[in-house]
Structures are given as structure tokens and as C-alpha cells.
Image (spheres, rainbow, N blue to C red):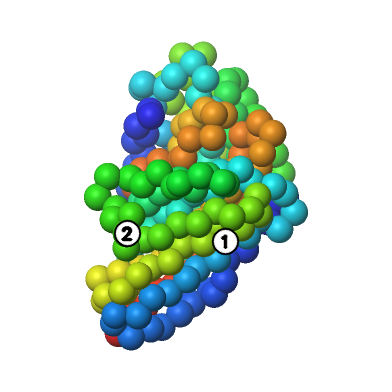
Amino acid sequence: LAKTTQPISMDSYEGQEVNITCSHNNIATNDYITWYQQFPSQGPRFIIQGYKTKVTNEVASLFIPADRKSSTLSLPRVSLSDTAVYYCLVGDQAGTALIFGKGTTLSVSS
Amino acid sequence: GAVVSQHPSRVICKSGTSVKIECRSLDFQATTMFWYRQFPKQSLMLMATSNEGSKATYEQGVEKDKFLINHASLTLSTLTVTSAHPEDSSFYICSARPSGGWNEQFFGPGTRLTVL
């Protein structure tokens, strides 16, 4: 399974755009890139998933360059409630488990 | 989106007792479910993969006789922590991937186990 590398922590202020980049140099052809958000004492919550180029939903955008060796999660105009740990994972559709890295702890201040 | 529930949400037990945690997919069928454990300030660690109708596959270092997994139906997997000890105190999280080729994996809310 492809290993991912993310910054351990990031700080931001309310209203700013936050971009979290994840490296996955060994991503396989069949792997998708998925981002999850986790609050303390809760299970991870799905944010967004993509395979290549750009994906956007109501909460975030995901940018994936052509070589797919990295990806960037973009959170527009963060609020205090976006303070959480964000995990980048890669995996295929074959039913294999998702392996979590250390994640990025995002702290949003007012 | 699809919903996964866990029961109980938190449990406190005495050392030496066994505790069962249930994981249910409420509005979809899941051939495969996964069990994770998370210690404070750490990431989720995969414990085992649970397949409906067959034996679970355990990760290296996870004792299968201590963490019993049963996946009796397409919507229910259970994790039993046998002879629990204080070092088993942790946050246990299950996840499920819908049958039929979905690529998303949905996580339960977690179960906080405290062993006294």
C-alpha cells in the first residue's frame, strides 16, 4: 500500500483558505486518493475523494497533478469548527483496508 | 451518506472481563468491515479485516485469541475483547465498505473502552 506523508500540523485563522498537501510517491495505478476529517473521540468522516485532476464538493476541493504523486486538500474560508485532524489515504477498490498515516492537525484560531 | 453505528459508545469494565463491541451498517450491506484501534494523540491502527461468513484477517501483532471478531451477517460485525486489561483501554473504531464496488469506506463513531 502506498505510504503518505503530510505535515504534522498547520495553523490558520478564520476565513482563510487552507491547503494541506500530501505526498504519495508510490501510488499505484488503481489507487484513489481519499481525505478524512477526525474530531476528538469521533470516527473519521469522509471529506473528498479523487483519482486525477480536480474534484470539488460542497466542503472542499482536491487537486491532483498529472503524476499523482501528491495531492492537495483545499478548505475554503475555514472556521473554528474545522479544527481537526485531516488524513490523506490512498487505496484501491478491491476492499482492502485503508492504512492511516499520522495525519495533519489543523488548528483554526479567531 | 451511508451510516455505520457502534454499540456501546463507551464502556468501563474490570480487568479480566470480556467486552463485546457491535458495528452495524444501517442502510447498506457490507461484505467487509474493518476494526481499528486508536490510542490518545495517535493515528488509527488497523487491527483486523472482517469478512462476512469467513474468518477475520488480523494484522501482525494483534492477538486473534484476544480480539475475537465475528461477522455473522452483511450488516453486523462484532469485536470481543477477551480478558481485558488496562493496556487494552483505547478507542475502537469500525468501518465498512459497501458491497458492490463502492470506493468509499464509512466509519463508525467509535467505542471508548476503559479497563480498570
The percent position of residue B18, horizontal first and vertical second, equals 38, 75
The percent position of residue A68, horizontal first and vertical second, equals 47, 19
The percent position of residue B107, horizontal first and vertical second, equals 56, 54
Q: Which residue is mark 1?
A: B23
User: Do callouts 2 and 1 point to residues on the same chain?
Assistant: yes
Estimate how packed mark 1 is, as few (under 14), some (14 to 19) or many (20 or more) residues with alpha carbons within 10 Å. Answer: many
Estimate how packed mark 2 is, as few (under 14), some (14 to 19) or many (20 or more) residues with alpha carbons within 10 Å. Answer: few
Residue mark closest to the camera, 2 vs 1:
2
Residue A104, visible in the rendered structure: no
The image's mark for residue A48 is none
- Foreground: B87 or B42? B87
Q: Judging from the image, what secondary structure is the residue with disc 2 in?
A: loop
The percent position of residue B80, horizontal first and vertical second, equals 43, 66
Precedes in sequence: disc 2 or disc 1: 1
Quarter of the C terminus of chain B within the rendering:
bottom left
> Residue B75 appears in which quarter of the rendering?
bottom right
Which amino acid type corresponds to the residue marked 1 in the rendered image? Cys
State yes or no: discs 2 and 1 in contact (Cβ < 8 Å).
Answer: no
- Foreground: B49 or A19? B49
Q: Determine whether, in the image, residue A92 is placed left or right of residue B2.
A: left
Q: Determine whether, in the image, residue A16 is placed left or right of residue A90.
A: right
- Foreground: A110 or A108? A108
> Residue drawn at (35%, 32%), measured in percent from left and top?
A3
Q: Chain of mark 2?
A: B
Please tell me whether residue B23 is drawn above or below residue B13 in the rendered image. above
> Residue drawn at (33%, 45%), measured in percent from left and top?
B59
- Foreground: A28 or B85? B85
Q: Which residue is mark 2?
A: B65
> Residue drawn at (36%, 43%), measured in percent from left and top?
A101
Q: Determine whether, in the image, residue B79 is placed left or right of residue A59.
A: left
Q: CA distance from mark 2 to mark 1?
A: 19 Å
Which amino acid type corresponds to the residue marked 2 in the rendered image? Asp
